[in-house]
Image (cartoon, helix red, strand yellow):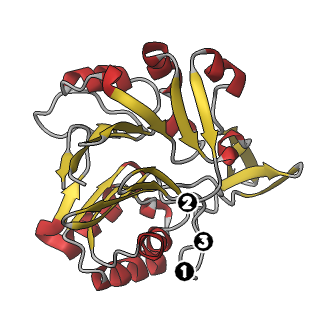
Amino acid sequence: MRGRITVICENSVAPGRGGIGEHGFAALLETERGNYLFDTGKGEGLIGNLLAFDKDPLSIQKILLSHGHPDHTGGLAAILDLLGEVEVWAHPGIFMNRFVVKKSGGREEKRFVGIKFQRAYLESLGAKFVLDRGFKELTQDIYLSGEIPRKSPFETGDPRLFAEVDGKLVPDPFPDDQSIFIQSPLGLVVLLGCAHSGTINILEYAIEKTGVDRVYAVFGGTHLDFSSPAQMDETIRTLKKYQIEKIGVSHCTGPKAASRLFQEFGDRFIFGQVGESLEF
């Protein structure tokens, strides 16, 4: 499998590339077997950015969702309005009620951060949901991960994020956190949405499910901006074991974590801003 990943939505814009930035993530996966949209950003820049980079929205064959946060699903209505009927592959947990809970000065602030569209509304626009919890082949050599086993003890997640489970507010388990695994001639390419289940957990699962132990590239959001220094250190130490040739980070990685990764990986590092691409 040969192809290209282009960042369509992200917090910032690569110099001289055009498009606009927004707090969110979306990437276009173009391959010899079809074009796929992974996430849809917050909803403000998706269509305009696709056109700014001469990407035809009508060429998108399927929409794939990493999880149900609004900065990854906010552009769904806009792209469905253009495409009409199209399959939307996701985990059934994308419609969970989700919240950010912050405590300050003895007060607690709770903000809703679930998907902002009802399923029925999206279906009325043409969404044909394919909801599955398991590892799933999209086409030959391209896979949607399904639920990621949580085996790395140091990947603890963001303590501010909660979800309603059985009527109770609990730390968000993110069962719907999914990534894309691509088998390329250069090795395995792993495309992340936000990596809520842990970047290392995702890489280990990609190797286990595909049987490919050579990781060529990791690209997307890592959520390391919200991790502890200990988690950051252990993540870097483990990443170095894989001898990855390209590490492109976006969105929830954050500037501090991105700077640290650049220091550690040098020429192998890519700042995955709007307009940045990875060929494989």
Tag 3–tag 1 contact (CB < 8 Å):
no
Name which residue type carries label 3: Pro
Instruction: Label 1: state its secondary structure.
Output: loop
Measured in 3D between alpha carbons, the distance from the residue under mark 1 to the one under mark 2, in whole angstroms, is: 19 Å
Residue where numbered disc 1 is placed? 152
- First in sequence, mark 3 or 2: give its number: 2
Q: What count of labels does the image hold?
A: 3
Q: Can you give x and y, in whole percent of width and height, for residue 80 in the image? A: 49, 20
Residue where numbered disc 3 is placed? 149
Q: Could you say which is closer to the camera, residue 101 or residue 60?
A: 60
Instruction: Label 3: state its secondary structure.
Output: loop
Name which residue type carries label 1: Ser
Residue at point 17%, 28% (across, down): 18
Measured in 3D between alpha carbons, the distance from the residue under mark 3 to the one under mark 2, in whole angstroms, is: 11 Å
- On residue 135, the disc is 2
Q: Give the quarter of the image for residue 8.
A: top left
The mark lying in front, picked from 1 and 2, is 2
Is 250 placed left or right of 163 in the picture? left
Which residue is the extreme one toward the right? 167
Q: Is residue 40 among what the camera can see?
A: no
- First in sequence, mark 1 or 2: give its number: 2
Is 117 placed above or below 162 here? Answer: above
